[in-house]
Amino acid sequence: MTRVVKIFFLAAFISFLSAQAIGQGEAPLLDDDFSDLPTGHLFSVVGAHLEYHFLPEAGPKGNWYVAAFTSDPESQRAWRVLEKDGEKT
């Protein structure tokens, strides 16, 4: 085998071992507590008003805030808190 092929297989083997080691310490990607938030839509439909004005309706709610949205009202209703089996999700 050529040297390049040996290096390739060695790198692939090391990557495989690293991936296996990482998988052993699994952790949740996101863990948030929604219990302080009211059920329903997190944010109101505000339209283009936020281009030049601050409105409290678009301010942060818990750890969540609107980073960007379009003028389509449905895009502004994407985030909501639901209650399932007595627990907010």
Image: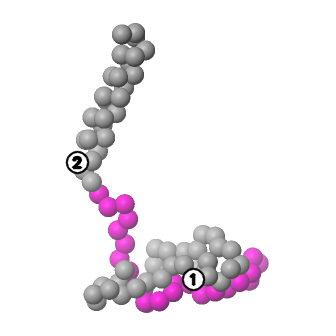
Total numbered labels: 2
Whether residue 17 sits left or right of residue 29 in the image: it is: left
Q: Alpha-carbon neighbours of circle 2 within 10 Å: few (<14), some, or many (≥20)?
A: few
Q: Earlier in the sequence, mark 2 or mark 1?
A: 2
Which residue does the image show at 32% across and 61% down from the upper left?
28
Whole-percent x and y of residue 6?
Answer: 36, 16
Which residue does the image show at 35% across and 29% down from the upper left?
12
Magenta stretch: residue 18 in it? Answer: no
Q: Amino acid at mark 1?
A: Arg
Q: Alpha-carbon neighbours of circle 1 within 10 Å: few (<14), some, or many (≥20)?
A: some
Q: Which secondary structure, mark 1?
A: helix
Magenta stretch: residue 39 in it? Answer: yes
Q: Which residue is mark 2?
A: 24
Q: Which residues are magenta?
A: 27-56
Which residue does the image show at 46% across and 78% down from the upper left?
62
Give above or below for 4 relative to 19.
above
Give above or below for 45 relative to 64.
below
Q: Using the image, tell me which numbered label, if any, was put on residue 85.
A: none
> Of all residues shown, which one is farthest toward the right?
52
Q: Which residue is mark 1?
A: 77
Q: Amino acid at mark 2?
A: Gln
Whole-percent x and y of residue 78?
Answer: 54, 78
Indicate the quadrant containing the N terminus: top left, top right, bottom left or bottom right: top left
In depth, the one of 30 and 56 nearer the eye is: 30
Indicate the quadrant containing the C terminus: top left, top right, bottom left or bottom right: bottom left
